[in-house]
């Protein structure tokens, strides 16, 4: 099972490729094409991606694949609109937080369903999961994917509690 976003400080290129559903060679190419994407280098060679880098990758992916920008057009848009990067970083930070943004907040920020649909491994932003409220949310989950997501979250929270004890 791949590591979920928000469980580590740094992610390898393979983990990021799996989380974003992109090939590692694409990530390496984007690193040379987009100035804003600069993962840290560990021991001089290996790339270490933070959540910030993953947010930028998801934003670039959306610009190139969903909105059909050319590479040059996406570069220009990122350069001219730095709030896009800040919004993407804030979006991912809230996704891994205990209090994810509501769908209305994402839509108001211009980050609505596009990012959610392109990255199915990330938790859905309209499902708020808090450690103390997992059981009550589980009872209200109506679809099988929601129940499966909540079961996975409960398992991960249990593992985290075991580590902390």
Image (cartoon, rainbow, N blue to C red):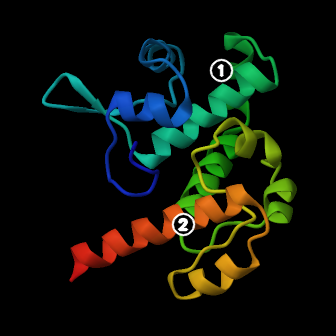
Image quadrant where one finds the N terminus? top left
Q: Position of residue 126 (x, y in %)?
A: 75, 64
Asked whether disc 1 touches disc 2, contact meaning CB atoms under 8 Å apart, the reply is no
As drawn, is 8 to the left or to the right of 65?
Answer: left
Residue 142 x/y as whole percent: 79, 68
From the viewer's perspective, is residue 156 above or below residue 75? below
Task: Using the rendered image of the protein, determine whether residue 91 is visible from the camera's viewpoint.
Answer: yes
Instruction: Quadrant for residue 104, please give it.
Output: bottom right
Q: Which residue is denoted by mark 1 in the rendering? A: 75
Residue behind mark 2: 151
At label 2, counting other C-alpha atoms closer than 10 Å, the crowd grade (few under 14, some 14-19, many 20 or more) is: some
Rendered position, 152 above or below 70: below
Q: Position of residue 21 (x, y in %)?
A: 55, 28
Of labels 1 and 2, earlier in sequence is 1
Give the farthest residue toward the left.
43
Q: Residue at x 31, y 45 (%)?
A: 10
Residue 140's place in the image compared with 85, above or below, is below
Q: CA distance from mark 1 to mark 2?
A: 40 Å
Residue 79, can we see it? no
Q: Residue furthest front?
A: 144
Quadrant into which the C terminus falls: bottom left
Q: Residue at x 60, y 74 (%)?
A: 129
Front-lying residue, 44 or 146 = 146
Which callout, 1 or 2, points to the residue nearer the camera?
2
Q: Which mark is residue 45?
A: none
Drawn side of residue 37 relative to residue 125, left or right: left
At mark 2, the secondary structure is helix
Residue 110, image x, y percentages: 83, 48
Tell me the element at label 1.
helix
Count residues near mark 1 (Cα–Cα under 10 Å), then give few for <14, some for 14-19, many for 20+.
Answer: some
């Amino acid at each position: 099972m791949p590591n979920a976003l928000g469980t580590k400080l740094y992610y390898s290129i393979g983990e990021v490729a799996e989380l974003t559903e992109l090939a590692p060679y694409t990530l390496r190419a984007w690193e040379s094409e987009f100035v804003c994407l600069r993962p840290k280098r560990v021991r001089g060679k290996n790339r270490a991606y933070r959540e910030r880098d993953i947010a930028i990758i998801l934003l670039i992916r959306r610009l190139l694949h969903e909105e059909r920008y050319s590479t040059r057009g996406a570069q220009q848009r990122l350069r001219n609109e730095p709030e896009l990067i800040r919004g993407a970083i804030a979006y991912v930070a809230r996704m891994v937080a205990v209090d994810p943004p509501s769908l209305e907040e994402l839509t108001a920020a211009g980050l609505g369903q596009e990012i959610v649909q392109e990255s199915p491994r990330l938790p859905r932003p309209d499902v708020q999961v808090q450690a103390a409220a997992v059981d009550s949310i589980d009872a209200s989950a109506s679809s099988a994917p929601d129940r499966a997501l909540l079961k996975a979250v409960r398992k991960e929270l249990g593992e985290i509690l075991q580590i902390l004890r």
